[in-house]
Image (spheres, rainbow, N blue to C red):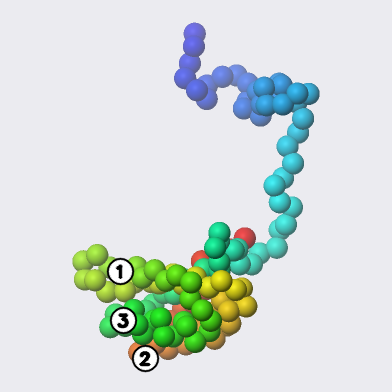
Amino acid sequence: MERGRGFSEQSQSTRLHQGRIGSGGSSYEAASTETSSGPQRSIEGWILIGTNIHEEASEDDIEELFSDHGYIQHMTVNRDRKMGRIKSVLVEYGEKSEAQDAVNKLDGSKLLGQEITVDWAFIK
């Protein structure tokens, strides 16, 4: 009796090593053996996420705050659909040193009297 995918007696790893993937059933190597944690670069730069943004903050306020630490390649403001208020912001820097400076100096700083959180958007 034929069953749907996932119901065979053989495990998937056994099937993969029966020569269907490569000659000789060679084993796989890990893509990266690096286990250290830290920021991960996106395709074009280093992306930070800022949260706990004051509801009255404007995009200009945020851009001014983040641009003090380097050239902003791209900035995306995420808004509450119902009220239109800023919920979070994604800021992309071209250089890791600029992004690191922004994280160090802006995380825990105040924007319009409210403490904001700034961290790396992508972590290894």
Q: Is residue 86 visible?
A: yes
In the shown orientation, is residue 82 left or right of residue 69? Answer: left
Residue 31: x, y in percent?
A: 70, 47
C-alpha distance separating marks 2 and 1: 20 Å
Could you say which is closer to the camera, residue 68 or residue 38?
A: 68
Looking at the picture, which amino acid does disc 2 mark? Gly
Looking at the picture, which amino acid does disc 1 mark? Arg
According to the picture, the residue beneath numbered tag 1 turns out to be 79
19 is higher (above) or lower (below) than 115: above
Q: Quadrant of residue 45?
A: bottom right
Looking at the picture, which amino acid does disc 3 mark? Ser
C-alpha distance separating marks 2 and 3: 14 Å
C-alpha distance separating marks 3 and 1: 11 Å
Tag 1: Cα neighbours inside 10 Å, few (<14), some, or many (≥20)? some
Tag 2: Cα neighbours inside 10 Å, few (<14), some, or many (≥20)? few
Q: Which mark is residue 113?
A: 2
The residue sitting at 24% across, 71% down in the picture is: 84
Which circle's residue, 3 or 1, is located before the other in the chain?
A: 3
Q: Quadrant of residue 62?
A: bottom left
The residue sitting at 60% across, 19% down in the picture is: 9
Residue 86: x, y in percent?
A: 31, 74
95 is higher (above) or lower (below) than 16: below
The residue sitting at 73% across, 37% down in the picture is: 28
Which circle's residue, 2 or 1, is located before the other in the chain?
A: 1
Residue 80: x, y in percent?
A: 27, 68
Q: Quadrant of the C terminus?
A: bottom right
Under circle 3, the secondary element is loop
In the shown orientation, is residue 106 left or right of residue 51? Answer: right
According to the picture, the residue beneath numbered tag 3 turns out to be 58
The residue sitting at 52% across, 25% down in the picture is: 6
